[in-house]
Image: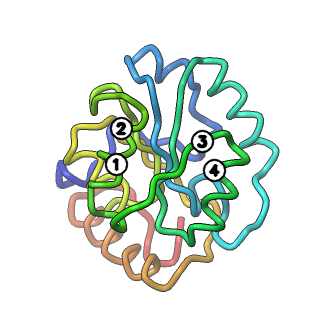
Amino acid sequence: MNRWLAPRRRVRRVVDLDPRSLVDRGIRAVVFDLDNTLLPYSAKELEPAILQWFEAFRAAGLRGAVVSNAFFGRAGRAAEHLGLMIVRGAPKPNPMRLRRAMARLETRPDQTAVIGDQLFTDMLPGNVLGMYTILVDPLAPGEFISTRLMRILEWIAGRRDGDSFPGPHGR
């Protein structure tokens, strides 16, 4: 797969990732996508497993931010509930918001991970900046129309290079 799109690591869900493994890699902070990464698309409440995972996240000494193209009110409520800052600005995949998040988290790219469920809006800008990129499977099949279109491109990119990315209708 194109090195700009390839994640450094893949896990099924955020909760399958041990926060201490990030610390062991020298990661001090994580920038999270929201929709279908931490919260199923159109869901209103965070799952208990995510809330419990964030306890381990904080216990490991990690800090975090949400950078999402979701509506600000929804993203802000979720970020606040998780104890994360939210970073506004140009929509992803523009890397400026990731840069702004790192500035607010006071970390360099080599000390910062980005976790998301999309190649073009999460992995691409993270890889361009030299961050540690982690791809998760989407939490739910329902998605915004533009995301569904991007899934087709992800499928094409993955198939072309023989990777096991899902078809355009989900994992």
- Amino acid beneath label 2: Met
> Which label belongs to residue 98?
1
Label pair 3/1, CB-CB below 8 angstroms: no
Q: CA distance from mark 3 to mark 1?
A: 14 Å
- Amino acid beneath label 3: Leu
Label pair 1/2, CB-CB below 8 angstroms: yes
Q: Is residue 160 left or right of residue 155?
A: left
> Which label belongs to residue 144?
none
Q: Which residue is mark 2?
A: 102
Q: CA distance from mark 1 to mark 2?
A: 6 Å
Position of the N terminus, as image quadrant, is bottom left
- Amino acid beneath label 1: Leu
> Which label belongs to residue 84?
3
Q: CA distance from mark 1 to mark 4?
A: 15 Å
Label pair 3/4, CB-CB below 8 angstroms: yes
Q: CA distance from mark 3 to mark 4?
A: 5 Å
Place residue 16 in its image quadrant.
top right
Label pair 3/2, CB-CB below 8 angstroms: no
Q: Secondary structure at mark 3?
A: loop
- Looking at marks 3 and 1 on the same chain, the residue that comes earlier in the sequence is marked by 3
Label pair 2/4, CB-CB below 8 angstroms: no
Q: Is residue 87 left or right of residue 159?
A: right
Q: Position of residue 15 (x, y in %)?
A: 65, 38
Rendered position, 60 above or below 123: above
